[in-house]
């Protein structure tokens, strides 16, 4: 078995518990958006539930096809649409595009810097992998800027060599092409790398690109960190056999 030198690690469901993040996200948007656009905090928080769901549905449709524009531009346009949909629901006027882009970006930054996503045991295991000489890269579908912000809030940004969102390589995380792109961009031999993801599909795509994969599986009554640490134990077992 080839020596493992590199880990490609997903964000949501691996480093961050999305079930904890979502309610905080809504509450923090409710704090921030009235300072820019007026309106009731609870109304903004409520409006995000539907707007976020529709944004995710648009993302699911988009990643099934090759991007007609750059993925970075797609995200920029879609986040403006997300803000406008919330404005409509709250009953506030839509700001001009440039102002909307600034407000949407500032709102997301406000959230990223204030969410409680502490996961000390996960962070310590990442630090241990780093101390052992492994190169860590993030391999997520999200926007690069969002990923950098969340890693910084988690206190792990300095551990990661490259932070891949789909927009950084202009390839959706929807098949093996995504993994081939990040392997090429990092100059990594697939035989020397492992993907850690909470999606079985993602690890199957990675396998098509020649990568080994470890899936984070969370039991119904299991704590988030426990499920991630069990997956990291699988990574450690692979390291010991390599």
Image: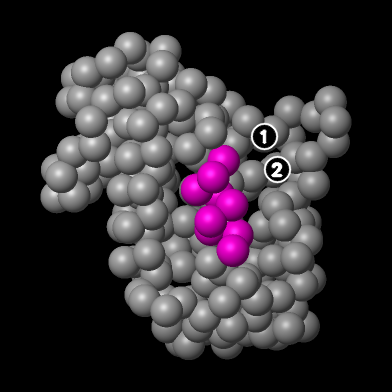
Q: Position of residue 155 (x, y in %)?
A: 39, 39
Q: Which residue is depicted at the point 28% across and 16% down?
A: 39
Q: Which residues are magenta?
A: 53-61
Q: Which residue occupies 65% across, 66% down?
A: 195
Q: Are marks 2 and 1 in contact (CB under 8 Å)?
A: yes
Task: Say which quadrant the C terminus sits in.
Answer: bottom right
Which residue corresponds to mark 2?
229
Direction from residue 81 to residue 127 in the image, left or right: right
Report the residue at 85% width, 31% height from top.
220
Say the numbered circle drawn on residue 116.
none
Q: What secondary structure is found at the residue carrying circle 1? A: helix
129 within the magenta span: no
**The quarter of the displayed image where residue 192 is located:** bottom right
Q: Position of residue 185 (x, y in %)?
A: 42, 83
Whether residue 210 is visible, yes or no, is yes
Label 2, residues with CA under 10 Å away: few <14, some 14-19, many ≥20:
some
């Amino acid at each position: 078995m080839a020596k493992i030198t590199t880990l490609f690690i997903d964000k949501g469901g691996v480093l961050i518990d999305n079930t904890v993040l979502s309610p905080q996200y809504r509450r923090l948007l409710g704090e921030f958006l009235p300072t820019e656009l007026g309106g009731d905090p609870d109304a903004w928080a409520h409006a995000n539930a539907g707007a976020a769901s529709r944004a995710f549905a648009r993302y699911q449709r988009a990643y099934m096809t090759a991007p007609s524009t750059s993925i970075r531009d797609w995200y920029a346009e879609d986040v403006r649409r997300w803000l406008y949909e919330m404005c409509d629901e709250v009953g506030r006027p839509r700001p001009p595009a440039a102002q909307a882009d600034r407000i949407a970006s500032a709102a997301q930054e406000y959230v990223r810097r204030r969410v409680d996503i502490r996961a000390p045991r996960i962070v310590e295991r990442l630090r241990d992998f780093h101390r052992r000489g492994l190169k860590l890269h993030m391999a997520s579908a999200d926007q690069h800027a969002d990923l950098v912000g969340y890693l910084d809030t988690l206190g792990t940004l300095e551990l990661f060599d490259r932070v891949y969102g789909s927009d950084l390589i202009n390839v959706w995380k929807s098949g093996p092409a995504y993994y081939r792109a990040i392997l090429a961009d990092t100059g990594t031999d697939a035989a020397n790398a492992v993907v850690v993801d909470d999606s079985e599909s993602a690890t199957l795509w990675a396998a098509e690109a020649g990568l080994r994969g470890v899936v984070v599986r969370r039991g119904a009554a299991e704590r988030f960190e426990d499920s991630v640490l069990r997956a990291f134990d699988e990574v450690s077992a692979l390291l010991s056999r390599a």
